[in-house]
């Protein structure tokens, strides 16, 4: 995958290989599933910087972040009891530690959803750690980064954001399901997006990569692929519309690369092609981290800026936000906005 440097866990860094490099000033590390292992991820980044002699400017995390502040937050996270652990985020939340690199993340299907719901449009969850909300677009050093949290389940897609803590057996899961509102908002984007991150995969993305190799490593994907059930159709629609230069995902705990050549589309952003990469979870000898080198506007500075187009979209679509479990209609052909 051009422009990317593949990374593994700290103890196996001696086996790293640079797939391709090019001269640029901004280095972005991308993590697959975090699963609360912030200390291990930051240790990996620090060791990588030491061995390679460069600095990581930004860390993107593709979900399952698990921003657990206390034991109460564990009750809002949909995981088996044996995985209900505080891990290390609380140390960053209470400022015992500070993230060594600017960190931006989206939500997955294993989150402290009560905390995430406090920031539906995104915000700082701890010093130097920023959550993108249900969906969003931000800029860092002039690089435009988009993201959408959660996973897709068709039976909840057209509902409002009705869940409230304390969650019940069903709402502790439905709370992280992607909704049509966020997809609609992202489809209003007209300017080019450099990087997009999601937790779930776009449906059909496997047809643009080495699907045979994927099935050798994950043979239980075969039926879902044959039945066209692997991944999310709304994300495939966003891929077609946004056409970002890079798209990163996680969720399925496997590294998988694909290259998508886009056809001209009505209303699309026309990025020509997208390099897709799914990453694994943070475990030894697993491909959970990737480094992207990308040009940026030096005068902008490496700090988060809110995106003007996205802010406009949020303002113009605020009336579409519903807090009930009933069907929510979006504007457009066949949408029947109500």
Image (cartoon, helix red, strand yellow):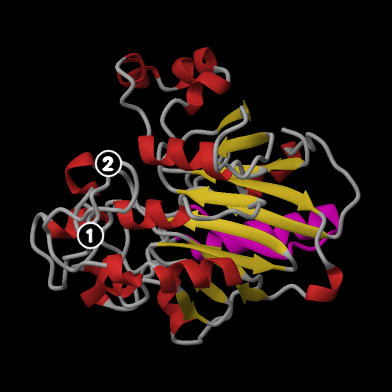
Which residue matches tag 1? 175
> In the image, 236: left or right of 6?
left
Residue that appears at 78% across and 34% down: 19
Q: Is residue 193 magenta?
A: no
| Residue 72: x %, y % from top left | 21, 76
For the image, the number of numbered tags is 2
Q: Is residue 46 magenta?
A: yes
| Residue 61: x %, y % from top left | 53, 57
Label 1 to label 2: alpha-carbon separation: 26 Å
Identify the element where label 1 is drawn.
Answer: loop
Residue that appears at 22% across and 50% down: 158
Residue that appears at 34% across and 48% down: 332
| Residue 110: x %, y % from top left | 31, 55
Which residue matches tag 2? 334
| Residue 142: x %, y % from top left | 74, 66
Asked whether the viewer can see residue 232, the reply is: no
Q: Is residue 257 above or below residue 178?
A: above
Out of 20 and 97, give the one closest to the viewer.
Answer: 20
Out of 314 and 140, give the one closest to the viewer.
Answer: 314
Label located before the other in sequence (1 or 2): 1
Extent of the magenta region: 37-62
């Amino acid at each position: 995958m051009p422009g990317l440097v593949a990374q593994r866990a700290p103890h196996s860094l001696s086996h790293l290989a640079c797939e391709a490099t090019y001269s640029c000033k901004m280095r972005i590390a991308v993590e697959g599933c975090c699963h609360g292992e912030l200390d291990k991820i930051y240790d990996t980044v620090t060791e990588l910087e030491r061995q390679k002699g460069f600095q990581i400017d930004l860390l993107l995390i593709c979900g399952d972040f698990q921003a657990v502040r206390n034991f109460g937050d564990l009750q809002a996270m949909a995981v088996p009891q044996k995985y209900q652990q505080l891990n290390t985020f609380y140390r960053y939340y209470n400022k015992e530690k500070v993230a060594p690199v600017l960190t931006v993340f989206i939500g997955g299907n294993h989150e402290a959803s009560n905390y995430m719901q406090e920031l539906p449009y995104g915000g700082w969850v701890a010093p130097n750690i920023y959550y993108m909300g249900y969906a969003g677009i931000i800029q860092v050093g002039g690089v435009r980064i988009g993201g959408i949290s959660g996973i897709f389940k068709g039976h909840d897609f057209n509902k409002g954001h009705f869940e409230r803590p304390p969650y019940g057996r069903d709402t502790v899961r439905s709370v992280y399901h992607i909704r049509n509102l966020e997809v609609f908002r992202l489809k209003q984007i007209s300017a080019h997006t450099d990087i997009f991150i999601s937790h779930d995969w776009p449906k059909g993305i496997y047809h643009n990569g080495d699907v045979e190799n994927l099935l050798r490593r994950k043979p239980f994907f075969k039926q879902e692929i044959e039945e066209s059930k692997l991944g999310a159709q709304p994300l495939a629609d966003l891929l077609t519309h946004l056409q970002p230069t890079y798209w990163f995902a996680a969720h399925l705990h496997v590294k998988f690369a694909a290259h998508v050549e886009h056809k001209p589309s009505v209303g699309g952003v026309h990025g020509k092609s997208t390099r897709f990469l799914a990453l694994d979870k943070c475990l030894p000898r697993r491909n959970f981290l990737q480094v992207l080198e990308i040009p940026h506007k030096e005068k902008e500075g490496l700090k988060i800026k809110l995106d003007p187009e996205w802010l406009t979209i949020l303002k113009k679509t605020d009336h579409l936000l519903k807090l009930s479990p009933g069907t929510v209609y979006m504007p457009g052909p066949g949408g029947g906005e109500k």
